[in-house]
Amino acid sequence: MLSFLLRAFFLACFVTNITLATQVINIGNGAEPRDLDPQTVTGVPEHHILLNIFEPLVGKDPKTLEPIPAVAESWKLSKDGKVYTFKLRTNAKWSNGQPVTAQDFIYAWTRLLTPATGAEYAYQGYYIKNGKDFYSGKIKDRSQIGLKAPDPYTLEVTLENPTPFFLSLLYHHSLYPVHEATVQKHGQRWTRPENIVTNGAFTVDKWEMNKIIRLKKNPHYWDKDKVALTEVNFYPTENLDTEEKMFRSKELHVTNEIPLEKIPSWQKDKTGVYQQYPYLGVYYYWINVTKPPLNNKLLRKALALALDRERIIKFVTRKGEMPAAAFTPPGTAGYFAKPRLPTDGREIARAKELLAQAGYPDGKGLAPIEILYNTHAGHKKIAEAIQQMWKQNLNVQVRLFNQEWKVYLDSQRTKNYQIARAGWIGDYNDPNTFLDLFLTGGGNNNAGWSNKTYDDLIAQAAKELNPKKRLEIFQQAEDILLDELPVIPIYIYTRAYLKDTSVMGWHPNIEDIHPLKFVSLSPKS
Amino acid sequence: MAPVFLVVVTVVFFMIRFAPGGPFDSEKQVPPQILENLNAKYHLNEPLWKQYWRYLVALSHLDLGPSFKHANRTVNEIIAEAFPVSLELGLLSLAWALIIGITAGGLAALKPNSLLDYVPMSFSIFGICLPTFVIGPLLVLVFGLWLEWFPVAGWTHWQHRLLPSLTLGFAYAAYISRLTRGGLIEISHQDFIRTARAKGLSEPKILVKHALRGGMLPVVSFLGPALAGIISGALVTETIFNIPGLGRFFIQSALNRDYTVVMGTALLYFSLIFVCNFLVDIVYVILDPRVRYE
């Protein structure tokens, strides 16, 4: 009798498990998010969550990344390209049932431009008229910022310059709306699960630090009938080996990354689980041009030409990355920078000549050069390969230094380095996010490089209405960059991760954006 | 204790601030106005001695301050969430360590220099030599991926507790087994054990009823620092199994330069070590009648 009951009990559990094959997805998300405040956070793990709990004015098609209606149903652009008029849908609601209005966006964007908020991405608001001046305090009256709401469901945005990528920019989390009353009431604690109010396809149900962030379908979301998933669980997965094991034991549907050593074996996978796609980012080395000997342009060019990028990708990184022949990733908003750097070893002879012209024939008289990278097995391997290439091809000695992340950032900021490893992911799909890195005095210009013609070209591109002409201006700027070489581009990023075959609606794209509104789980057989 | 506590507070406070890099450094440069605002909000622009004094005053109210990295939580909240997890992991691991260790050591002490001795002791050598980041993934591979008996990571259901506590406990079990064996063998040469044998009691009964109490003394001395060590040093196990414990927070916050979390955790660990050692002294008195008479 007992054994019968036991068997019946286990069978019941088993059956319930099968019939409850629910739309609950488990996703590995990398580092524990710092916060869920759209205006103050900066990281990719945070963005993965924010894009699902908040909804921007304009969304992105999950396949093509083209702008699609989100909170805004439709929009018009003025002839001079500076004024957008957005018509908001009238049935968009916050998770507490209140309607989403134009004022919510004005509040959020003004908040972004208020220094007291502590928004590191405040400069995303500079594209709006008087945004920069309000932020710096030149203008004290917030109504002077180019944002108007003639009625609750119309938002008029006046820009400083025609900004062709503005619709793409709206997808950045710093421009998501927030619920003013909630923020005012709870202050810094407004993002806690018991307080937070969101307008996206999902709401925050649970947030246990370092353990889980659980989202549940938002019952007030205007498009909730299209949302298949009922629950989303984001797991912090800093340890890549653990994450891979979690995937193999079916505890995760999608991972954030893959340990480097496991990539070759996963690349042989025939089940369609291994994903590898180009990503909107570039891996490169900064060169500190403020100190000799690297203030010598010929020396920098010799170093850049003496690298066999294809070898590095084939034998060191092995993720099918694209070797970088320019700085901006090809295909960024239709821009294909002309290749100015060799992708393989064909220019080594010329590199040797340039080295001699620089005053160091066959490496003689050149003190060892130092490469700095943040402690990480992958960066170390790449640096070692480059060290070997420069030694072999140019007879230039190289010393490698690794520093912990914060120290490494500090060293770059204080220009206490010669060559430093870096990576830059685009904030939006446009060459501007890559090329404005190098403006004179730019906050992220770690090379200390300055070129007036370059600055002028970038400023000119910001005002250019004709898309074709604009890309030509960028090409001119890029040519200057690749001639002076304050950076040595190495490869264009790829994203490599694992995705279970039951996950539908998760499309690869260059920005690696996968809004869960369009995702569902196919029932397992 | 209070003066030592104060020294620890002071040393940690100043040491973390001497490391280059601050809590608000990031790859995409923070605009200077923002940095000023953030520093002002958290009083990081005040002279160091003033910040130190401010911290001490708050500490006297048991307020460990806000987290610099996680704006919607205080350090007290973070520790309140993470510490019970580490505590549970630590106690479970210790339980495993004691069960496995004492049994193995006891068996070995029953028949020294026989197979009953060599087999458990060889296992214990493995436990001492293999680090947790080898044992952990091995257990995960066998019991998680091949046999699929237990989940691979996480801390939600009771099944999640088993592999991590075994991993962490195994290393300590090894030490405890050797200490138990040594302690029991030493005790078994005492007069009162010979008396028991003369009275005709069986070896196992002698071991459990008479020898164990005295033979446990070396284990008890080991336990104090071990318990503190298990709770604070579980970092590797927490990382392998994705457990939201205090060890992981400690390291993350140090790397993030989240000064307040680092300080709060360091002070907690210090208090823990102190309490554990104190408890051990008490247990010692209970176990060993000889100590009492002194």
Image: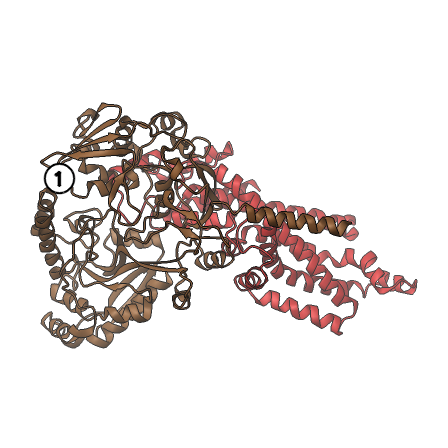
Q: Colour scheme used in the picture? A: by chain
Marks counted in the figure total 1
Q: Which chain is drawn using red? A: B
Residue at x 35%, y 37% (from the top left corner): A54
State whether residue A431 is above or below residue B107. above
Instruction: Specify the farthest residue to the front.
Output: A525
Please tell me in which quadrant of the rendered image residue A100 appears: top left
Q: Can you see residue A376? A: yes
Q: Nearer the viewer, residue A83 or B217?
A: A83
Left or right of residue B44, residue A126 in this image: left
State whether residue A409 is above or below residue A189. below
Q: Can you see residue B10? A: no
Q: Nearer the viewer, residue A234 or A273?
A: A273
Residue at x 47%, y 57% (from the top left corner): A247
Instruction: Specify the farthest residue to the right.
Output: B199
Q: Nearer the viewer, residue A159 or A458?
A: A159
Q: Mark 1: which amino acid?
A: Pro
Q: Position of residue B143 (x, y in %)?
A: 59, 61
- Mark 1 surroundings: few (<14), some (14-19) or many (≥20) residues within 10 A: many
Q: Which chain is drawn using brown? A: A
Q: Position of residue A123 (x, y in %)?
A: 22, 40
Q: Position of residue A189 (x, y in %)?
A: 41, 32
Residue at x 46%, y 49% (from the top left corner): A26
- Under tag 1, what secondary structure? loop
The chain containing the residue under callout 1 comes to A
The residue wearing badge 1 is A162
Left or right of residue A278, residue A191 in this image: right
Residue at x 38%, y 39% (from the top left corner): A226
Q: Position of residue A462 (x, y in %)?
A: 12, 43
